[in-house]
Amino acid sequence: MAADHSHAGGGVVTHWTESLELFVEYPPHVRGVASEPWAIHLTWLADWKPVREGRLVLLLRGPGGAREEIVLPAPASPGIYSASPTLSETGTWRADMTLTAGGADHAIPVGQLRVFESEDALPHDVEQPLPGLIALPKEEQWAMPFQVAVAERRRIPNSIPVTGEVAAPARGLAHVSTPVEGLVLVQGPSPAPGEVVQKGETLALIAPTSLDDSYARMRADVEEAGREANRMERLFAAGAIAESRLEGARHDLAVARAAFEVVAGGGSGEEDGGPEPYVYRLRSPIGGVIAERHVAPGEHVATGTHAFTVVRPDTLWFVARVPARYAEAASDARGAWFTVEGTTHTHAADRVVSVGSIIDAGSRTLPVRFAVANAGGELKVGMLAEGHLLLGTPVEGVAVPTGAILDEDGLPVVYAKVGGEAFQRRVVETGPSDGTWTIVHSGVSDGEEVVVVGAYQVRLASLGDVEVSDHGHPH
């Protein structure tokens, strides 16, 4: 077996396939003698959890056609299989495994091992662990959220760190206020926060309680002007008046209607089967979701009372506050990424809405607005955000997932996985980031594995006094 390292004739191997990680510790082998148990650890790479069921076949082939096959019908415990081969010939043997699970066969080429003539022939030199290794047993990895990713070369634009907030577009938010004084009727509609409403939908019915310059008075003016216009129509048809008087009556009706519609929001009050002609229908000026409701059925409201807030949530704005020293570079913004308070999920924005032209005197920042798709509704208007503006030509280099980088006393640190149960702490020099991936100029090489989920637990393990038995490198 091409062991990561030797244990006086035994060894430890870590190997990755497309779907599985193998970590096996095997003892030294003497011809014709059953070995101490192999500790075979198998982990699904999809979720980094142990293999809980499936048949494992360990096939060993040696000199002169010698062969040993061991069938293990199920793991002895989650993720762990155990075998004690008896190998009949001295020399180099080849080991391979096949896991049959979920209706599929998974081939795991393991490597080579040596079989010795006697215990006296076993080597006595044991490879010493590399310095600075951190041990975290597989059982602990399986018991916690854990995930590893491979560092790879990527092209990522330069970026500027920014703070900001989530806002509604200019026509994506409406504060609905009461233009009349009155009583909110109990028998009217009563949409709650979170409910979807359509443009023009009635949000509440209000019975006006004042006539002076009120909704009711304006409605009466419209009706009076309408009656007068109808009378002028009849008189003109009979030839009793000049056409100018008819046009004057029509003009007065148009003015009364226009004044009333400003207050009534375009509604007549009689639509939708309204029960009373003098009940005001408070309508939503946009389609969206009720974000806030400030009035209750039966409540008396004054003119100008803020009753509802309606938000169109499918597309919002990320308003980035760019420090004044980066104001010139902000004009080259090609996108942004950000996180909001209370979550580590990264949101991407690739459409620039506008770049401000005035530096805010108080914060010394320049606003840059980005449109952000919000189909899932995760973003809320008013959320504070932190992120980066992406600028200009991308930079190429080795990149790791951003979540793999920890801040330890001001130093960016990642934990590299160098074996099944072995890790190394690496201080890295970070470069541009797109929120998901970050370029590292040092500390990690292309193809190395870094801990993305569970890095903090690896760090805690580094603070303990644990013996490291696995100090090899994957192959």
Image (cartoon, grey):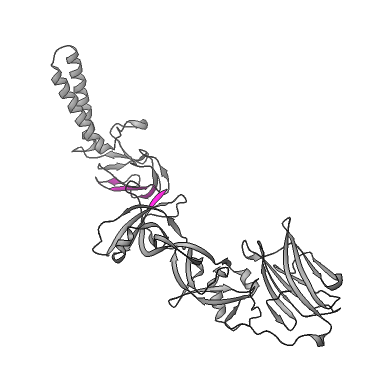
Q: Residue 381 falls in which quadrant of the image? A: bottom left
Taking the magenta stretch, the answer to whether it contains residue 198 is: no
Residue 434 at least partly seen: no
In the image, is residue 447 above or below residue 410?
above
The spot of residue 432 in percent (x, y) is 43, 66
Question: Nearest the camera: 182 or 341?
Answer: 341
Quarter of the picture holding the N terminus: bottom right
Q: Residue 275 falls in which quadrant of the image? A: top left
In the image, is residue 358 above or below residue 34?
above
26 horizontally vs 174: left or right: right
Question: In the image as oriented, which residue stretches furthest toward the top?
Answer: 238
The spot of residue 79 in percent (x, y) is 69, 68
Range covered by the magenta-colored residues = 290-316
Q: Report the residue at 25% width, 42% height from top.
A: 179
The spot of residue 336 in percent (x, y) is 40, 58
In the image, is residue 387 above or below residue 1?
above
Question: Nearest the camera: 209 or 85?
Answer: 85
